Image (cartoon, rainbow, N blue to C red):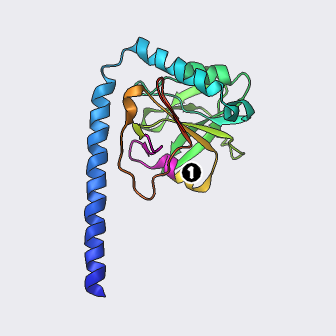
């Protein structure tokens, strides 16, 4: 029995190391591709993505939406956060240790730079109400609705204890045929880019 367990652990360890290496390679590859996207194209693709989402019943019925305050290498969200905030309750994630802490968005003037250089509401008050819809950034997605993040696992841990509708968003170049997925990786309900709608 101990020999069998040892073999299984070896196989598992080898498989985990392979997945980690594949994810690292994809992150580097996508990072290089993003450098070729102009600011104008980023804004065009973002507008196309969010126009699609606004037509979904999931968006129309949502009262509270968890969005993200985009970094320069992500699908831009600053304008859409401001726009949607006029009719929805918009929540943004902040990072605290290993967890995502949620805070209400109350205007661009109230934003500050938080952990990992991510913009977040300058407030000590966290939000613990119901989230109806989450717009999820990622490094890459595939046609089976798998998502590859930055490797910290913040969203995966959040989704383990919360089950809202999850829509992954990104640039067209972020859709791959396949990305490696481990058992703790949580897939999306939909993935939207300018040219792709994966349901």
Residue 60 percent coordinates (x, y): 72, 30
Say which residue appears at 74% left-offset and 34% top-offset: 61
Number of numbered discs visible in the structure rendering: 1
Q: For this rendering, which residue is in front, 89 or 26? A: 26
Dominant secondary structure, magenta = loop
Q: For this rendering, which residue is in front, 199 or 160? A: 199
Q: Look at the image and say whether residue 122 sits in the magenta stretch.
A: no
Residue 93 percent coordinates (x, y): 56, 39
Say which residue appears at 65% left-offset and 19% top-offset: 83
Q: Quadrant of the C terminus?
A: top right
Secondary structure under tag 1 reads helix
Q: Is residue 24 left or right of residue 55?
A: left
Where are the magenta residues, as a range?
143-156
Q: Quadrant of residue 7?
A: bottom left
Q: Quadrant of residue 3?
A: bottom left
Residue with the mark numbered 1: 159
Say which residue appears at 35% left-offset and 49% top-offset: 180
Mark 1 surroundings within 10 Å by alpha-carbon count, few (fewer than 14), some (14 through 19), many (20 or more): some
Q: For this rendering, which residue is in front, 90 or 176? A: 176
Say which residue appears at 30% left-offset and 53% top-offset: 19
Q: Is residue 21 above or below residue 139?
A: below
Residue 51 percent coordinates (x, y): 59, 20
Residue 59 percent coordinates (x, y): 68, 31
Q: Specify the farthest residue to the bottom.
A: 1
Q: Quadrant of the N terminus?
A: bottom left
């Amino acid at each position: 029995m101990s020999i069998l367990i040892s073999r299984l652990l070896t196989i598992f360890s080898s498989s985990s190391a392979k997945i980690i290496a594949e994810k690292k390679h994809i992150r580097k590859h996508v990072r290089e591709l993003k450098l070729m996207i102009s600011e104008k194209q980023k804004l065009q693709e973002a507008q196309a993505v969010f126009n699609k989402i606004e037509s979904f019943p999931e968006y129309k019925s949502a009262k509270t939406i968890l969005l993200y305050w985009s970094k320069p290498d992500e699908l831009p969200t600053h304008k859409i956060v401001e726009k949607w905030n006029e009719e929805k309750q918009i929540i943004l994630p902040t990072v605290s240790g290993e967890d995502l802490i949620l805070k209400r968005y109350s205007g661009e003037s109230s934003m500050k730079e938080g952990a990992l250089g991510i913009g977040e509401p300058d407030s000590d008050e966290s939000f613990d109400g119901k989230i109806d819809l989450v717009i999820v950034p990622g490094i890459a997605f595939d046609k089976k609705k798998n998502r590859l993040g930055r490797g910290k696992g913040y969203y995966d841990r959040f989704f383990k204890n919360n089950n809202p509708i999850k829509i992954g968003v990104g640039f067209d170049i972020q859709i791959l045929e396949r990305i490696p997925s481990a058992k703790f990786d949580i897939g999306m309900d939909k993935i939207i880019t300018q040219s792709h709608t994966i349901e």
